[in-house]
């Protein structure tokens, strides 16, 4: 029996116990996990450093290294997020609707656990804690398959999770990590319908596409983030530049960072050079069209269609000057990934048209795409941003 199949069976065997675990016990386990993350911070960071050193030896790009890093602050942030998760209502057992039929039959629509969640993710060790904690809060078990780039970090975090579960008298088999990170194991996981109730891929477009194309287990598709900022003719200059800098540079390696800025030509004629200077001062490499090059000089790299299709996840951005709102909307709907899009404008008609016509999970007016987050929306913790329309679009969590 393969390690994957053995762990899938172990995880599946815990579902009944988890589904009937009290809110008090689940929250107690989350509090213990928060405490253990802080207590074992040094151990986690030492194991994480092994991944970082290995990644640099392999030539991983710094944007991927950034996703991989677990420093003291990030571990504290994970521990704090668990305390926030405790404060959220336990959804399990909620009666959403109820009614009585003419024959006296009483019908109730009740929230219940999914069962076993399969998580497939890239070099993001924080997802290990996100997935395990959200599944625990909602009475689900989870089978984790991370990237080889984060294997030491993920193994350390799962050890910490198991320590907390044991102290809580909950089955530690409810969270299992597949240590074999080969493609063959991933492909086998795609077909574990008997033991997995849903698969959630968390990562880049290639990973998500591979899971969607090959899995027979139902998939909750989280979207890659080729996000756009459209600066309309009436946009306030200072606001537009501030939002552009935030949406690109606050954390460029995440899926809600912008990758392309579309600029109305009339605004560009007055202010594009200032936007370019601000981006360059923030160490952003600019790929632009001819108009952008005319304002930015030799430092502007000629943009191609490939640039407009690319989720850079880095200090790189594409700029395209457009003649009309409709041209901007058409570009977004052609190249976007239905994740997060924003318009900076004081024209109410343009804002309404943009909101109605852009096809995305989150659409903003005069705000950064970086707000696409479960806690920022007031929904609580999230497992990912779904761009599907046949399930829950947007932030998905507890």
Image (cartoon, grey):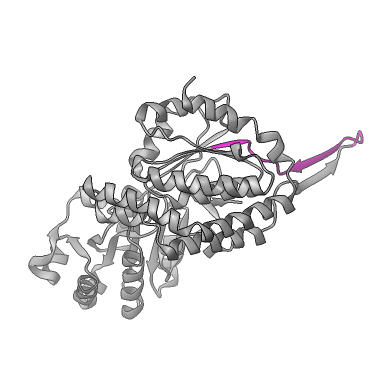
Q: Where residue 176 sits: x, y (%)?
A: 53, 37
Front-lying residue, 200 or 68: 68
Query: Of all residues shown, which one is farthest toward the left?
Result: 298
Relative to 349, is 377 on the left or the right?
A: right
Front-lying residue, 366 or 257: 257
Relative to 174, is 185 on the left or the right?
A: left
Q: How many marks?
A: 0
- Residue 283 position by quadrant: bottom left
Residue at 22 percent of width and 73 percent of height = 272
Residue at 51 percent of width and 43 percent of height = 389
Is residue 6 one of those drawn in magenta?
A: no
Q: Which residues are magenta?
A: 102-117
Residue 391 visible in the current orientation = yes
Q: Where residue 115 sits: x, y (%)?
A: 63, 36
Query: Of all residues shown, which one is farthest toward the top?
Result: 1
Residue at 69 percent of width and 57 percent of height = 89
Residue 380 visible in the current orientation = no
Q: Where residue 252 sits: x, y (%)?
A: 32, 60
- Residue 301 position by quadrant: bottom left
Residue at 81 percent of width and 45 percent of height = 98
Q: Where residue 362 sits: x, y (%)?
A: 47, 57
Front-lying residue, 143 or 288: 143
Relative to 21, is 127 on the left or the right?
A: left
Front-lying residue, 118 or 75: 75
| 206 is higher (above) or lower (below) than 288 | above
């Amino acid at each position: 029996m393969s390690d994957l199949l053995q762990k899938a069976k172990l995880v599946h065997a815990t579902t009944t116990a988890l589904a009937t675990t009290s809110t008090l016990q689940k929250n107690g386990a989350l509090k213990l996990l928060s405490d253990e993350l802080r207590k074992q911070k040094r151990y986690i960071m030492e194991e994480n450093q092994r991944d970082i050193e290995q990644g640099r030896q392999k030539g991983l790009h710094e944007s991927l290294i950034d996703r991989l890093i677990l420093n003291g602050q990030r571990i504290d942030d994970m521990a704090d997020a668990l305390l926030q998760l405790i404060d959220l209502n336990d959804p399990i057992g909620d009666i959403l609707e109820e009614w009585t039929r003419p024959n006296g039959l009483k019908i109730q629509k009740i929230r219940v656990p999914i069962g076993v969640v399969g998580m497939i993710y890239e070099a993001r060790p924080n997802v290990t804690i996100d997935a395990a904690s959200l599944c625990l809060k909602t009475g689900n078990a989870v089978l984790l398959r991370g990237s080889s780039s984060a294997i030491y970090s993920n193994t350390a975090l799962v050890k910490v999770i198991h320590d907390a579960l044991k102290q809580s008298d909950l089955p530690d088999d409810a969270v299992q990590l597949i240590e074999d990170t080969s493609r063959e194991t991933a492909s086998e996981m795609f077909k574990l319908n008997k033991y997995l109730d849903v698969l959630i891929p968390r990562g880049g477009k290639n990973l998500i596409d591979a899971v969607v194309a090959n899995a027979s287990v139902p998939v909750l598709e989280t979207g890659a983030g080729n996000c756009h900022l459209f600066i309309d003719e009436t946009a306030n200059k200072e606001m537009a530049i501030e939002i552009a800098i935030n949406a690109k540079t606050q954390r460029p390696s995440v899926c809600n960072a912008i990758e392309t800025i579309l600029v109305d030509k009339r605004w560009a004629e007055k202010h594009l050079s200032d936007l370019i200077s601000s981006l360059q001062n923030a160490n952003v490499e600019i790929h632009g069209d001819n108009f952008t090059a005319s304002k930015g000089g030799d430092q502007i790299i000629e943009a191609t269609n490939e640039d407009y299709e690319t989720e850079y996840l880095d200090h790189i951005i594409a700029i395209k000057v457009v003649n009309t709102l409709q041209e901007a909307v058409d570009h977004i709907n052609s190249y976007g990934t239905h994740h997060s899009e924003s318009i900076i404008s004081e024209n109410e008609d343009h804002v309404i048209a943009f909101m109605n016509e852009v096809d995305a999970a989150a659409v903003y007016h005069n705000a950064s795409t970086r707000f696409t987050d479960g806690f920022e929306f007031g929904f609580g913790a999230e497992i990912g941003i779904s761009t599907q329309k046949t399930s829950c679009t947007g932030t998905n969590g507890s």
